Image (cartoon, rainbow, N blue to C red):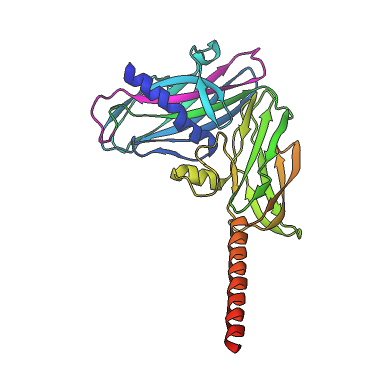
Amino acid sequence: MFKLKTILFCLPIYLLLLLLVPGVAYAAEFGLSIDPPVTTIKALAPAVATSPFTIKNNGEAQVTLKIQIKPFKPAGENGDLEYFKEIPDFFKDIKILDGNSPTESLTLSPKQQKTLELSVDIPQGTTTSDHYFSVIFISTDTSPIKSNSSINQIGIASNVLLSVGIPETPNSTLEEFSSRLIFDKGPVPFTVRIKNQGAHLIQPRGQIIIKNMFGQIVGSLDLAPVNILSDSIRAIPNDAYLQELSAQKNPDVGFKLLDSRRPIAIWKENFLLGLYTATLNIAISDQGPIFKKDIHFFAFPLRGAIIILIAVILIIITGKRLKFYANKNRT
């Protein structure tokens, strides 16, 4: 039981990456993969919502997996999840089907993959709202794993984002678009925060355009696609931030990237000079709303200027000394 709790405690960190970037989630060190890692379902009550997904054993040994349904809610602004301590009644009728039969466990041979089906019964009278949960696969094997970890269980999960009710115009606000005012060098970090006050999740698409003092476009940043769950605020990064986060390194950019409380968008331009204007354009959905905001920042390479100033002073002093000695020799 202790090991199972340890695995479930670590899962939110793994699931954060699943919510940030859609795609196939690999757990190479675990030997499991699941596709899709995030499923979005929209339905009207009453209905039985279904969605297939595939889990694969990439390892060299047979594995038996226990299947669990864990509802969650957003926690913080960087995609963290918080699991419910008690499972609400709505989630108790969710089934995982192997063929036409419900199953709570699964055995996979080495390199075997299996397609299962998620089935959610949505009864008449279900209120318009979103329901978020993870389908978690935890191994019941006790054989040791070749790793530095003392935990000999493996696991993987797929997140499900279920929206029940008629689609609505998103109710959201641009909470923040900001950066520092003065820089002596790049890269430049931008903070973009969107608040979702609606009943359903939103998937905004945005871009930051950067112009210099002459009105020329010198930078363009595409914001990463993210899911902003209902009644939550999300800070939106770009691919440059996600790459640095994935590489687990802290670049020498004048701020601690991985220690940041919120994800950021990074403009990877090192040499900066003059006044810049950054314009955010972000569409909350295909039907709107669209937010646009300008901010300004100034850049002056102070260190370079100090070096140049010192060099000029040295040249002047050297020139005066040479002239002094030249006049002295004439006399």
Determine whether, in the image, residue 101 is placed left or right of residue 232: left
Which of the 4 image quarters holds residue 122? Answer: top right
Name above or below for residue 64 compared with residue 302: above
Which of the 4 image quarters holds residue 287? Answer: top right
Numbered range of the magenta stretch? 119-148
Q: Is residue 144 magenta?
A: yes
Judge whether residue 47 can be spotted in this image. yes
Which residue sits at x=69%, y=45%? 181
Query: How many numbered dots are placed on residues in this image?
Result: 0
* Front residue of this view, candidates 76 and 100: 76
Which of the 4 image quarters holds residue 321? Answer: bottom right
Residue 255 in percent (x, y) is at: 55, 44
Determine whether, in the image, residue 207 is placed left or right of residue 81: right
Residue extending furthest front? 331
Name above or below for residue 186 compared with residue 232: below
Residue 182 in percent (x, y) is at: 67, 48
